C-alpha cells in the first residue's frame, strides 16, 4: 500500500512540474533568445506600451499572451497571426472600445479585459467560437449587448466591479444558465 502511494505521489509531482514547465511565461527579452517555436507563453506587462511590439508576432506557437498593465487603447490586426492563442490578458490598459480584433483568434478560450474603460460588449463577442471565460471586471459597462448571450462555449463571466441590482443580476443569470456569472453584492440602485 505504501509503495503504491509513493508511486502515485511521484507521478503527481512529475506531472505537476511538467505542466509548470510547459506554461512558463517568458519576458520578451528572454523569448528573443530561445527558439521561436518553443515560446508558448509571453508576458509583456507593466512596460507602458501603447502598441504591441512587432516582435511578439514572430512567436506563432503562443498559447498565452499577457499584455496587462500597459497603455494600450487598441490592438493590431496582426494579432490574427497568433492563431494558437488560447489566453489573452489585456487587463488594466486603456481600452474604451472592445478590441474586435480578438474575434479573429479562433482558439481563444480566455479573454481578460478587466480594469479598462469599456462601456459595452459588442455583438462581435459571439464570433469567438471557443471562448469559455470572459473577464470584464471593473469596467463602466452600461450595455452587455446581445452578443454575450450567443457564446455557446462561455462558462465564466466576471462582472464584478459593476453596479447591478438584484433584479438585473437575476435576469443576466437567467439568460446565461450554464455560465458562472460573478457579481459584487447587488446594489440598491434602480434598473
Image (spheres, rainbow, N blue to C red):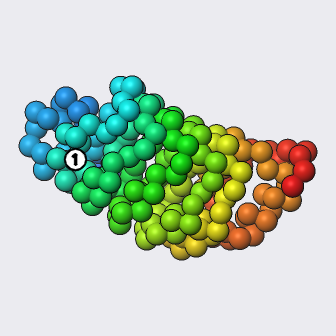
**Position in image of residue 138 (x %, y %):** 64, 40
Q: Is residue 11 visible?
A: no
Q: Which residue is mark 1?
A: 57
Residue 70: name its quadrant. top left
**Position in image of residue 157 (x %, y %):** 60, 56
**Position in image of residue 76 (x %, y %):** 33, 48
> In this rendering, would 70 be left or right of 142?
left
| Residue plotted at (58% across, 73% down) | 150
| Residue plotted at (26% across, 37% down) | 53
How packed mark 1 is, by other alpha carbons closer than 10 Å (few <14, some 14-19, many 20 or more), is: some
| Residue plotted at (19% across, 39% down) | 55
**Position in image of residue 91 (x %, y %):** 49, 39
Residue 140: name its quadrant. top right
Q: Which of the image's four quarters has the N terminus?
A: bottom left
> In this rendering, would 27 be left or right of 106?
left
| Residue plotted at (40% across, 56% down) | 101
Q: Is residue 75 visible?
A: yes
Q: Please tell me which residue lies in front, 106 or 118.
A: 118
Amino acid at each position: 500500500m505504501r509503495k503504491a502511494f509513493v508511486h502515485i505521489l511521484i507521478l503527481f509531482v512529475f506531472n505537476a512540474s511538467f505542466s509548470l514547465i510547459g506554461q512558463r511565461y517568458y519576458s520578451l527579452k528572454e523569448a528573443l533568445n530561445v527558439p521561436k517555436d518553443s515560446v508558448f507563453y509571453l508576458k509583456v506587462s507593466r512596460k507602458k506600451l501603447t502598441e504591441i511590439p512587432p516582435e511578439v508576432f514572430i512567436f506563432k506557437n503562443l498559447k498565452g499572451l499577457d499584455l496587462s498593465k500597459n497603455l494600450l487603447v487598441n490592438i493590431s490586426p496582426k494579432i490574427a497571426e497568433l492563431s494558437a492563442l488560447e489566453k489573452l490578458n489585456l487587463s488594466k490598459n486603456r481600452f474604451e472600445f472592445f478590441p474586435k480584433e480578438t474575434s479573429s483568434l479562433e482558439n481563444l478560450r480566455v479573454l481578460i479585459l478587466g480594469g479598462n474603460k469599456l462601456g459595452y460588449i459588442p455583438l462581435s463577442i459571439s464570433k469567438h467560437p471557443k471562448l469559455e471565460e470572459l473577464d470584464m471586471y471593473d469596467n463602466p459597462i452600461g450595455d452587455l449587448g446581445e452578443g454575450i448571450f450567443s457564446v455557446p462555449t462561455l462558462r465564466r463571466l466576471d462582472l464584478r466591479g459593476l453596479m447591478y441590482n438584484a433584479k438585473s443580476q437575476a435576469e443576466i443569470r437567467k439568460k446565461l444558465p450554464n455560465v458562472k456569472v460573478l457579481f459584487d453584492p447587488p446594489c440598491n440602485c434602480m434598473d
